[in-house]
Amino acid sequence: MQLVARDCVREWTVALSVVSLALVFGTALGVVPRALLPIAPDAVFAAIPHVNAVLSTVAVASIAAGVLASRRGEYEWHRRLMIVSLLLFAGFLVLYLYKVAVRGPASFPGPTVVEQYLYLPLLAVHILLAVICVPLLYYVFLLAATRPIPAVFETRHKRVARVAATLWVVSFVLGNVVYLLLYVVY
């Protein structure tokens, strides 16, 4: 018997989520050896947070446009916009992980009271939502990618996608608030 991806969406979701989150947390915890990575000029590292803020903002817009397209029954546009959103997220993540792997996480430059009562709680919620989103996004993506559009309606795609899109947008927005606190306000 031949197994096809559409019959193993949960298994693929778990496997991809574990690998992705291991890579993210491994990088954040310094497990990825810096010597394996090429070192970019300082200007590249300085630009990454700003580029990521733009990618996050465009991703929020593409997610919102994708949700609207779905509500209007424009499912091919919805699919394209969600793929764009995933690519923007992937670009964000690659740049962020590269910066963290080579330079480490950014330290908060503002007052301790702001760090303790605003920055760290916002960062924690942002990270928590991003972690929760990973398996949800893989799941809805795999459901949609392994089926023709009419067959997607027979799955849990719509129900899970509502939660995933909401959490994804909130995570991106909180990420931009964290960016503003790190690079604009302080």
Image (spheres, helix red, strand yellow):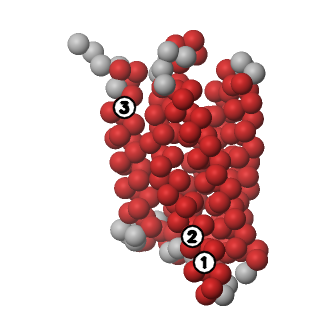
- From the top left corner, tell me how far across and down residue 6 is, in percent: 40, 21
Q: Contact, CB < 8 Å: mark 1 with mark 2?
A: yes
Question: Viewer-proximal residue, 7 or 104?
Answer: 7
Q: CA distance from mark 3 to mark 2?
A: 32 Å
Under mark 1, the amino acid is Tyr
Q: What residue did someone put label 2 on?
A: 121
The relative height of residue 85 versus residue 67 in the rendered view (above or below) is: below
| Residue drawn at (55%, 61%) of the image | 125
Say which quadrant the N terminus sits in. Answer: top left
Which mark is on residue 139?
Answer: none
The relative height of residue 103 versus residue 56 in the rendered view (above or below) is: below
Q: Nearer the viewer, mark 1 or mark 3?
A: 1
Q: CA distance from mark 1 to mark 2?
A: 7 Å
- Callout 1 crowding tier (Cα within 10 Å): few <14, some 14–19, many ≥20: few
Residue 116 appears in the picture as rendered: yes
Q: What residue did someone put label 1 on?
A: 117
